[in-house]
Image (cartoon, rainbow, N blue to C red):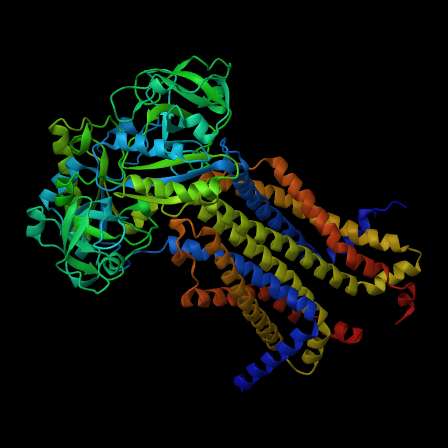
Amino acid sequence: MPNTLGGYYFHLAIRSLRRNVALTVLIIAAVGVGIGATMTVFTVLLAMSGDPIPAKSTQLFAVQIDAWGPDSRKQPGSTTIETRLPDILTYHDGQALMQAHAAARQAAMYGIGQVILPKEGEPFARSGRATYRDFFAMFQVPFHTGGPWSAQDEAEHRDVVVLGAKLAAQLFPAGNAMGQLVTMEAGAFRVVGVLEPWNPQPRFYDPSVAFGAEEGFFVPLTAAIDHQINMNSLSCHSPLGLGFAGRLESSCVWLQFWVELPNAAAVRVYRSYLVNYAADQQKAGRFAWPPLVQLSNVRQWLQTEHIVPDEVRINALLALGFLLVCLVNAIGLMVARFAGRSGAYAIRRALGASRSDIFLQCMVETAVVGALGGALGLALTDLGLAGQRAMLKTVSAYTGQLTHLDGSLMALTVVLSVGATLLSGLYPAWRTTRVSLGWQLKEQ
Amino acid sequence: MSAVMPVGPILSALKRNKVGALLMALQIALTLAVVANALSVIQRHWTDMSRPSGLDEANIFSLQNQWVGEPKDLYARIQTDVAALRSLPGVVDAEATNSYPLSGWTYVVGIRLKSSQANSSIQTSLYMDTSHGLAAQGLRLIAGRWFAADEVSEWNSSKSAPFIVVTAALAKRLFPGGDALGASVYVLDDRPMRIVGIVEQASSGSGSGSGYVDLSTFVPYQFVNNLLLYVVRTKPGQQAAVMQEAKQRLLDISRVRIVDSIQRFSESRTKVFAVAAATSWLLGTVCALLLAITACGTVGLTMLWVAQRRRQIGMRRALGARRIDILSYFHTENLLIAGSGALLGIAGGLGLNLWLTKHLAMTRMSPAYIVVGACIVLLLSQLAVLWPAIRAAAVPPSLAARGL
């Protein structure tokens, strides 16, 4: 009757835990603190290194083109040339790639900021994005009402806007945003769509703001250029031309460029298109170097862009170290516990229990300790995360949602705790089964 | 008889308890390796957080101003604004700038000694300041002079600024011989800029930045941009009143703007170091808990060993060993175990640090650091043994006679 036997072991475990309270508490504390520290740090790491768009992360590709040449990649005082290309494109290349339409879907984009003038109340600043209509289908952006602007809106540079859920609710609390005009610095834009809350973390398509608040609005890039809406960030290798027109003509990079390529064949075709494009630029004399291009899918991109700060990785490694110390400590204490109770085990052996019975009994006891340690660890993790949230509330890069313990993380905490404890209990339990029967009984 | 036991008998006793000793040594080693590296991370943050900004921190606050639309007369508007701020009662001075130390706004550029030098090896934080910059920030000039009003030109105009002021750290870095004042360097373009003054200290906009945190440059420009910072320095004790009035005064001049992030310098400081502080607290708390757990573990294991050896202890006592001999037996035993653990930990900790330095952005830990850490762990370990050892020493010699 394994069931009742399991229950019996559980009963024994509880009794045995109560026998040496100080040692039991110490083991549970060791496991709990190790788990708590590890999970506090790992919650942040997991949130930061998650896949922001799991359904399509292998079909979406960031495009890089060597627009600056190998000389730009030389480190000062070193002769080696880094392989890293500029991670975004020049306006020239972005426009050319959009016009070529060589992928199933493609969108150039750049981050912008606008002061918004509501009908009532004070003006406020909000960040948004200038892009192309494929952006929404490509990134599976959920619409609440309406949809992306049309190809015609785009071609005719119309002033239309898709509002993010938050901004829509703020500007039009009654929910009647569709067709209304939103007045921004650049002009009045007509609302053609309102999104459901959507804020992929990390923001893979623009890692310069990998962890930020939801983007407020989206406007056609063609219209944004007409209105000379400035880019939030710009990276240059040669002097900047004058004014907005200068930026468009310059070799400064400021456009993110994403394409959707559904399969390996499409990737091959697009890659050869890119290489040909760069070769044409070389022939035309714009590039004085051989073609060098790069296509990275979302996962590769997040890695290239170093989304997770080293700081967080170091913390995670140290936390893993903490857990290891706590587990070694727990092993030592469990050896001590079981050794202290070796007399009782010897009696059970003498009464007919097999070695595997004793082993099982020890492991049940260990699992109970692990579960209790997990509960303590859960409480400590919650405490640790609350502390982190309180200290980081001013830092937008670590928003609250990064440091919340959800159901699956809680389950992971307990499973990790019980698993790690069972693993560390293997040796002490095995050692206990090796007890010399006669000697122990004689000692009694 | 010396207080420390000869190690021979202890070693042969340890041979009978290899696993326990090994676990204890391993735990000490891991604790040391992890704690030393964690402390070195904390220490790096602490260095950043305790570095003076170079400003009159107690009396400075800042406002972020963003104009709506792109007014054509920005330069004139900014002049009006700062004049209004300066006229407020209790204000020492005020100015508009692109950034100031610990503001969270960074503008880092390369600085070169020769115009022909293609790449600059030294990076510097660039601050655009007018003739009011010195007084508005409370910087301490230690050599030369600050900018005169007629030397300041409008940012984005083609006029190049011929003069700069640098921090003492940057002056020393550029000219180790100490002849920085009057020398020329190249910062923005290929036109030389002469160093006319040296300030004691001004840290970077982020308060950190390996290599350039103290290396700052001030250029005589009136920063002109849609979005900028107003820095206001008040007389002691009058900050709160001025802060209340400042925003209203600006809005009275023009409402077509967004004035926000009005914050005391201390708030900027808290904000800019929020991640560093949170990380330090997390690692520090866990380190303390870890040391406590290791100490408790040592107590627990030693208690067990004492319990297992009660009869032998009784025998030794019966054969003439004093209490101090029993006490020193356990302390010496612990010293041997923890000592070998600490040696292992020193090697492991340095190895871990080396790996972290190589693969992640971690700073090298000085070996002295981990040796001190080893001493602390050993001391803690010895303290942890004290109580079990006292219990052992209390075993009566008569115990030996029982059960014979």
Picture quadrant where residue A97 is located: top left
Looking at the picture, tell me which residue is in the foreground, A91 or B291: A91
- Residue A347 sits in quarter: bottom right
Q: Looking at the picture, how far across and down is residue A54, in whole percent?
A: 29, 59
Q: Residue at x 28, y 28 (%)?
A: A72
What x and y, as percent, mark residue A11? Answer: 61, 81
Q: Is residue B18 visible?
A: yes
Q: Write the residue at 15% across / 29% down.
A: A282
Residue A199: percent from the left, percent from the top? 29, 56
In this figure, what is the number of numbered marks? 0
Q: Is residue B103 above or below residue A194?
A: above
x, y (%) of residue B83?
35, 31
- Camera-nearest residue between B88 and A21: B88
The residue positioned 24% from the left and 45% from the top of the image is: A114
Of residue A144 and residue A406, the one placed in the foreground of this image is: A144
Location of the C terminus of chain B (image quadrant): bottom right
Q: Nearer the viewer, residue B218 or A291?
A: B218
Q: Is residue A409 left or right of residue B393?
A: left
Q: Is residue B340 visible?
A: no
Q: Say if A12 sits above or below A228 in the image.
A: below
Which residue is painted at 55% across and 81% down in the image? Answer: A6
Q: Is residue A341 left or right of residue A162?
A: right
Q: Is residue B351 left or right of residue A84?
A: right
